[in-house]
Image: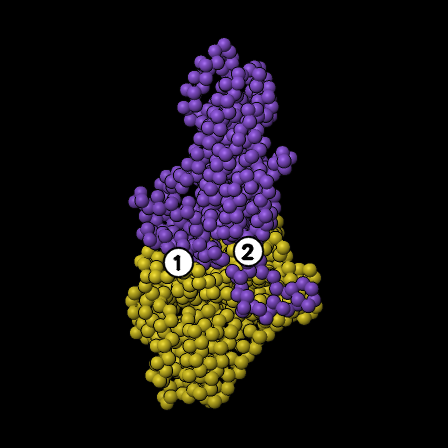
């Protein structure tokens, strides 16, 4: 270890130079390292550089030929690309240039950035060399891939390799990277892995060390034809195989499942067979939204109520929550999530493992059945999806040795902690941040009723700030009325209007505070329908739009429009206007085939309209959402 | 879009009836109708009624031998002022008043031109001259007006340069009807004078009739152009309800085009429900959406077609509330934003601070139930200013840069061209009706 550290100190500046100063310092570096050691070819040093160039701290420990046996495998594999060292160096120079200047291969660049931030957040740079070192073969593997790919177009293969490396460092954060690889790339990786597996089997290799040896062998064998990328990939992949198996699996698991598409007949059939609530299809389905469930509203509730005693598999608490979702008594991302988690808490408390079953498996299945019941009642929100994922991972993590009661207690406290930390505390932090953005004399506009925004406004009022609130509301839910009532009760000066008048009222507004159901990793804010309109008009008037959203609602999915994924509400609430008996034009017309009533629940606000996202990790621009998703989404805080 | 409703506000001061309105009883009732009752719905109907009222005013007006046009203009202005004051938000009233004034001026001008022409040609035989002009009058008034416009325009560079005799006549005629009459009076005999006065009134009334005809048929004329703009499988979005839009869409449907329509309901009047019902009744695939879903849906829309309340001289549009939202969303997604407007909606005014000055705040009861919120109303009332305000504007202003195309009964136009169209319909002297009228009174 010591020798490595010291040597790292020696070699670090060189690597840094490769990253930042492409042309000038390179040649000496090359000439230095090349001649003394023919095995340790130039690409070795560089190969690790394109990925690491931007954050020198994270550069894996320097490889010295004399270092250890572990070094050995890399040198040969790295050695093949350059027929003449000069050509490779130039191409490498270009490449690292790309990475630093334009960050043209996005995954690599993303990784670099991600690592930079992760280092910052961890504040423990020294841990990295060690981290990189723990899984030497995997660290090496990627470096050989780029090296072989650099001279050809197959540089594209770089991302996968690199992402693998990242996983070896930070086992669980790889999700966003994975998303960035295209289908073709993924296929390429898969094939390489398959080939590698086959090769490895043939050679009977099991441990990394031996793998390394084998690599050395195979590398030697391919040496005569150094330009062949395939063999290099095979080598790389075979190296991967030993250490990265679990990582690969993890990554696969992390891919967001494609959502249920309701225009897929067979799947809908399957779903129907399973579901407890038997919804009837809506009569006039909106063509554009065939992929979403469009069921008759108002029919499920009585059916469910009548079925109460038949649903013995369902825990009463879950059943109750489901009914509350269905009737709309509980709405809002946080409220729904908390209600669901508390129901699960109760369900877990009353749970006992059936004989001849393990707790983790059986409980997961149980939770899944609860979830599918809840989905029948109302499609899950992103916040609920994340919470469920958390819960399942916690269940999976329970060691078998733990007794049932202990396991249940652990889960109970885990859920409790999730609610407290991720929702309640997070809101408090958001309020603390957001209040700093409210000044005396401000006119704050908010849309609908967001629990976070309401807390912010109340807190700011308690602090004695002088401001006025404009509440914009929309049909059919009129959530704003409830907010208006609560705020006026508290003594805040409020102006109430409807969404069509937004252009009229926007003149006097100085800040727009919006809540969100979810923030997606491309910065899109997924929120109650109309949010995009408000943000757009505010953007047109050059008024800052601040979105308040707890980080647990962030999601790695991306979305460009509000069509592909959405939720449809009860269409009948469109045709009827409560309190306005004169609006009855559509009475009886909703039976007509030509008329469709569309009640969208959510819409997607493009990130360019959003000035700031206030989250429990601070105030970030929408472009930084993927960073939060990656760094905090997985392992770190949900462990 | 009803646009159209205008007549919504009880305009408290029904005591407009001064001497002028007593002489024209019909005016009084109309003003009342305009302000108090909801009898006149829609700017088209308002425009038509205004024109009919002015026609009756003109026919009842006793025309003096001298300064006939001036007398007519004064009479129309006096009535027009009251009409406009009765409902300043319904710009169609002012538009029609100005157009009638313009018609009077044009007719007067064409008569004078003909007279001067007659003088120049044959100063000897008055009878022959009369016959000639009778023949002329069989031509459409518009044609005469156009001819007059081309020959006798207020001093422009062209008229100044072309020929001196005409330009010399211009200042007399154009400055005001009275002056020209006074100056040219000596050239006519008494018999000629009487025939001329009858003639002027007759011509004006005929032209006003034509105007009324135009207003009545504007929907059809706009709808005729529908097939040029709507193709098969088009997806169209509209907000609220407008009869023009309805006719437009239906005209395309009649031409066997099948397309889909998204209708935003247009809170707080929910006219969209009405439009959706009409469209469904006529067999169009219609989807009713909430206003808040406009942004979400507009990415799948090919064209936005809406009606307007008024079109300003800069190409900006006064439209039912919510329209600016739709226009912004359309611009964001590069969807053409097409405004349908009959020519009676073209307003020669420029909008300054249109959101405030050309708007109308409506009853909060449309948004909040008073009973439901009665407990909140009292909060803070002790401290002076109430805590709760409700804003419910009736109109939106859509700036010209957001409009892709105007379709009027005179064809399609760019927003930047509207000023020219307006210059054809109005004379610059009438832009401010009120001040002129008060000065006259």
- In screen coordinates, is A308 left or right of B334? left
- In screen coordinates, is A620 left or right of B382? left
Residue at 40% of width from left, 41% of height from top? B219
Disc 2: which residue: B362
Q: Position of residue A154 (x, y in %)?
A: 43, 54
Disc 1: which residue: A585
Rate crowding at label 1 as few (under 14), some (14 to 19) or many (20 or more) other CA atoms within 10 Å: some
Q: Is residue A266 visible?
A: yes
Residue A535 numbered mark, or none: none
Residue at 40% of width from left, 87% of height from top? A353
Q: Chain of mark 1?
A: A
**The one of B37 and A38 positioned closer to us in this rendering:** B37
- In screen coordinates, is A69 left or right of B278? right
Q: Which colour is chain B painted?
A: purple
**The one of A637 and B439 positioned closer to us in this rendering:** B439
Q: Is residue A180 visible?
A: no
Q: Position of residue A486 (x, y in %)?
A: 59, 70
Q: Quadrant of the N terminus of chain A?
A: bottom right
Residue at 46% of width from left, 31% of height from top? B205
Q: Residue B247's image quarter?
A: top left
Judging from the image, what is the letter of the chain drawn in yellow? A
Q: Chain of mark 2?
A: B
């Amino acid at each position: 270890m010591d020798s490595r550290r010291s040597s790292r100190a020696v070699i670090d500046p060189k690597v840094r130079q490769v990253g930042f100063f492409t042309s000038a310092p390179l040649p000496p570096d090359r000439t230095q390292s090349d001649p003394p050691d023919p095995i340790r070819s130039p690409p070795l040093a560089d190969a690790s550089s394109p990925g690491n160039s931007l954050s020198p701290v994270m550069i894996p420990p320097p490889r010295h030929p004399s270092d250890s046996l572990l070094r050995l495998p890399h040198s040969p594999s790295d050695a093949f690309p350059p027929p003449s060292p000069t050509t490779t160096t130039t191409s490498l120079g270009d490449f690292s240039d790309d990475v630093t200047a334009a960050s043209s291969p996005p995954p690599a660049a993303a990784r670099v950035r991600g690592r930079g931030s992760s280092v910052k957040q961890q504040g423990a740079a020294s841990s990295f060399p060690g981290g990189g070192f723990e899984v030497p073969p995997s660290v090496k593997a990627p470096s050989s891939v780029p090296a072989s790919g650099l001279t050809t177009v197959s540089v594209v293969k770089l991302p996968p390799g690199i992402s693998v490396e990242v996983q070896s460092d930070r086992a669980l954060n790889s999700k966003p990277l994975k998303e960035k690889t295209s289908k073709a790339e993924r296929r390429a990786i898969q094939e390489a892995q398959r080939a590698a597996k086959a090769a490895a089997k043939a050679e009977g290799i099991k441990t990394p060390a031996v793998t390394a040896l084998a690599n050395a062998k195979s590398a030697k064998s391919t040496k005569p034809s150094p330009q062949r990328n395939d063999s290099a990939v095979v080598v790389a992949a075979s190296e991967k195989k030993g250490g990265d198996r679990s990582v690969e699996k993890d990554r696969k698991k992390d891919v967001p499942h494609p959502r249920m598409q309701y225009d897929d007949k067979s799947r809908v059939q399957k779903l129907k067979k399973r579901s407890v609530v038997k919804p009837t299809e809506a009569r006039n389905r909106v063509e554009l939204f065939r992929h979403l469930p469009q069921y008759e509203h108002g029919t499920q509730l009585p059916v469910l109520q009548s079925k109460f005693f038949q649903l013995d598999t369902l825990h009463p608490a879950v059943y109750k929550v489901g009914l509350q979702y269905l009737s709309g008594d509980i709405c809002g991302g946080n409220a729904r999530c908390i209600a669901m988690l508390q129901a699960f808490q109760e369900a877990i408390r009353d749970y006992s493992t059936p004989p001849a079953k393990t707790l983790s498996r059986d409980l997961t299945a149980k939770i899944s059945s609860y979830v599918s019941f809840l989905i029948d009642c109302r499609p899950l929100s992103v916040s609920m999806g994340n919470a469920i994922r958390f819960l399942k991972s916690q269940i999976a993590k329970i060691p078998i040795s733990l007794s049932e009661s202990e396991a249940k207690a652990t889960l109970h406290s885990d859920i409790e902690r999730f609610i407290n930390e991720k929702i309640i505390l997070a809101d408090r932090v958001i309020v603390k941040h957001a209040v700093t953005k409210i000044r005396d004399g401000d006119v704050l506009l908010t849309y609908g009723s967001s629990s976070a925004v309401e807390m912010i406004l109340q807190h700011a009022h308690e602090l004695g700030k002088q401001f006025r609130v404009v509440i914009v509301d929309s049909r059919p839910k009129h959530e704003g009325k409830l907010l208006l009532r609560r705020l006026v009760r508290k003594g805040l000066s409020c102006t109430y209007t409807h969404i069509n008048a937004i252009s009229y009222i926007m003149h006097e507004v100085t800040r727009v505070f919006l809540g969100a159901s979810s923030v997606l990793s491309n910065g899109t804010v997924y929120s109650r329908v109309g949010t995009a309109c408000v943000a757009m008009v505010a953007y047109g008037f050059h008024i800052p739009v601040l979105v308040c959203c707890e980080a647990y609602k962030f999601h790695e999915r991306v979305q460009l429009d509000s069509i592909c994924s959405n939720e449809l509400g009860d269409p009948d609430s469109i045709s009827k206007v409560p309190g306005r008996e004169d609006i009855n034009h559509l009475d009886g017309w909703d039976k007509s085939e030509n008329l469709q009533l569309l009640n969208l629940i959510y819409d997607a606000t493009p990130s360019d309209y959003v000035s700031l996202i206030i989250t429990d990790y601070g105030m970030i621009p929408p472009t930084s959402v993927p960073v939060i998703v990656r760094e905090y989404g997985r392992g770190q805080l949900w462990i | 879009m009803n646009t159209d409703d205008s007549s919504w506000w009880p305009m408290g001061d029904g005591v407009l009836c001064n001497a002028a309105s007593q002489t024209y009883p019909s005016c009084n009732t109309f003003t009342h109708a305009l302000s108090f009752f909801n009898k006149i719905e829609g700017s088209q109907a308002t425009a038509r009624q205004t024109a009919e009222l002015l026609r009756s005013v003109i026919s009842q007006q006793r025309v003096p031998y001298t300064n006939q046009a001036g007398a007519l203009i004064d009479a129309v202005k006096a009535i027009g002022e009251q009409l406009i004051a009765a409902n300043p938000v319904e710009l169609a009233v002012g538009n029609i008043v100005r157009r009638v004034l313009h018609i009077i001026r044009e007719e007067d001008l064409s008569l004078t031109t003909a007279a001067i022409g007659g003088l120049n040609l044959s100063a000897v035989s008055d009878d022959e001259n009369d016959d000639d002009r009778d023949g002329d009058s069989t031509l459409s008034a518009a044609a005469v007006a156009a001819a007059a416009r081309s020959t006798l325009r207020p001093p422009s560079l062209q008229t100044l340069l072309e020929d001196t005799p005409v330009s010399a006549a211009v200042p007399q005629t154009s400055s005001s009807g009275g002056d020209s009459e006074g100056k040219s009076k000596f050239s006519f005999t008494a018999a000629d004078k009487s025939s001329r006065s009858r003639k002027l009134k007759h011509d004006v009334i005929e032209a006003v009739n034509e105007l009324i005809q135009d207003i009545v048929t504007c929907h059809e004329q706009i709808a005729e152009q529908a097939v040029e703009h709507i193709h098969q499988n088009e997806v169209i979005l509209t907000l609220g309800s407008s009869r023009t839009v309805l006719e437009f869409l239906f005209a395309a449907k009649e031409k066997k085009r099948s397309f889909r329509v998204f209708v935003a309901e247009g809170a707080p009047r929910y006219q969209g429900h009405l439009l959706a019902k009409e469209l469904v009744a006529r067999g169009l695939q219609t989807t009713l959406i909430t206003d808040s879903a406009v942004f979400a849906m507009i990415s799948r829309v090919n064209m936005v077609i809406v009606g307007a309340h008024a079109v300003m001289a800069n190409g900006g549009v006064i439209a039912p509330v919510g329209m600016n939202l739709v226009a912004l969303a359309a611009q964001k997604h590069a969807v053409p934003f097409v405004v349908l407007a009959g020519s009676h909606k073209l307003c020669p005014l420029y909008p300054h601070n249109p959101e405030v000055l050309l708007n109308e705040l409506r009853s909060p009861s449309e948004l909040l139930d008073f009973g439901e919120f009665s407990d909140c109303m009292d909060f803070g009332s002790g401290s002076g200013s109430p805590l709760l305000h409700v804003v419910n504007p009736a109109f939106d202003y859509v700036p010209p840069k957001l409009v892709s195309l105007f379709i009027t009964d005179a064809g399609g136009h760019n927003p930047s061209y509207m000023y020219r169209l307006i210059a054809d319909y109005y004379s610059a002297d009438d832009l401010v009706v009120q001040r002129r009228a008060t000065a006259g009174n």
